[in-house]
Image (cartoon, grey):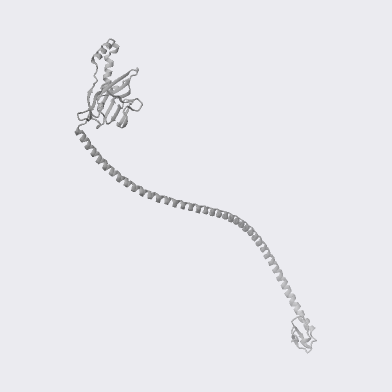
Amino acid sequence: DAKIYRCNATGDNADGANISLFAKKAVEYENNSTALIEEIRRIKKDENYCSFKKDDLADIKQRSRVYFSGSSDIIKERIEPLTLKCTFQVLKTDQNETSRLQSLYILHESKGVIAYVNKDQPVVTSLQGSNIQDVEGEIYDNAIKDSYLQVTWSNLKHTESGKYFCEAHNQYSEGRIDKSSNMLTITVERPTFDDLVEVIHKLFTQVDGAKESLKAINQNIKNINKDLDFKEQNITSIKEEVIRNQNNIQILSEDSNIKEQNMTSIREDLSTKQQTFLNIKEDVILNQQNIDKIKQDLNTYRHNMSNIEEHLEVILANLSTASIKVKNQTDEGSTLSYSHRKSCRDVNSTDERVVVTLTSGLKVMCDTKTDGGG
């Protein structure tokens, strides 16, 4: 209930114009010290509930580990963002610590939970809309890194002023849960005229920078478009080259098929020629055998011819001798046979020429083939 309350009054002024007036009253939260003292007195009756030796020392120790920081204690309404970071620090004296951090909370005194993170779970925030700029956090289950929870949001309102708490929940080995916290007071105040002027100046500066950036981006887009056109032309050329290469590959493939067919034909021809060569080789071997046989027959024939020549020489020699004898006998016979002829006309003989002795005693050679003799 610690909020700012408003009383509004609406009506017409003397000029008849409708106006609205309001008044504000802030209600703040304070601890009830009297009730707290009475509660302490009641608890002190039982020594087990008031052990300064353990609980208070542990509470002091835990509070010293919770560190809470903000980007600023004073935030300009709807202008400046707010960043709150809750850290559970790792201390060197924690080696024998039996507690384990379970969760971290960031809370507002009236709005409640702003964000929280549990062990082994993602961060959860109650902030909604476009005001959230960043929410992150993680609980580490070791003594090396500090666990943390951080939230950043903008467009803060005056109602978001007040106390913020960083709260850590620890669980001990015996099951007891202990809470330790730290506090920040954040004031969200309305901006002054100078603040607005400064913001407007920053906005103009950002706009000018954005214009320059936009101009550079447009130029980059133009350059990129040119590059894209150039690359598109290159891609078109590459596509045409690929098509030509595909056609060439197809032609080469067809040539390869033709050459393969030619090679097949050549292989078949070669196989046929090899078979023909084998046949020729067999024929050559057979002819060689025939030639060898013919040579043997020729040698035999030559030997026989040599014997025949020798025999014929003997026969010719005998014939020559016999012929000479016959001729001599013929000559003698002719001379004797034609001794009573008066002339060559009276001579008849199978020989072309004969020598006769006429009755007159004259010895002449007659030509028996010429009509009338001679």
Q: In the rendered view of the protein, which quadrant contains the C terminus?
A: bottom right
Residue 178 in the image: x percent, y percent? 31, 19
Q: How many marks?
A: 0
Q: Which residue sits furthest bottom?
A: 360
Q: In the rendered view of the protein, which quadrant contains the N terminus?
A: top left
Observer able to see residue 63: yes
From what the image shows, is residue 32 above or below residue 274? above
Residue 128 in the image: x percent, y percent? 32, 29
Observer able to see residue 187: no
Residue 245 in the image: x percent, y percent? 44, 51
Q: Is residue 308 found left or right of 264 in the rendered image?
A: right
Residue 6 in the image: x percent, y percent? 24, 24
Q: Is residue 356 found left or right of 287 in the rendered image?
A: right
Front residue of this view, candidates 320 and 177: 177
From what the image shows, is residue 285 above or below residue 203? below
The part of the image, by quadrant, that contains residue 198 is: top left
The part of the image, by quadrant, that contains residue 119 is: top left
Front residue of this view, candidates 349 and 212: 212
Front residue of this view, candidates 310 and 150: 150
Front residue of this view, candidates 355 and 19: 19
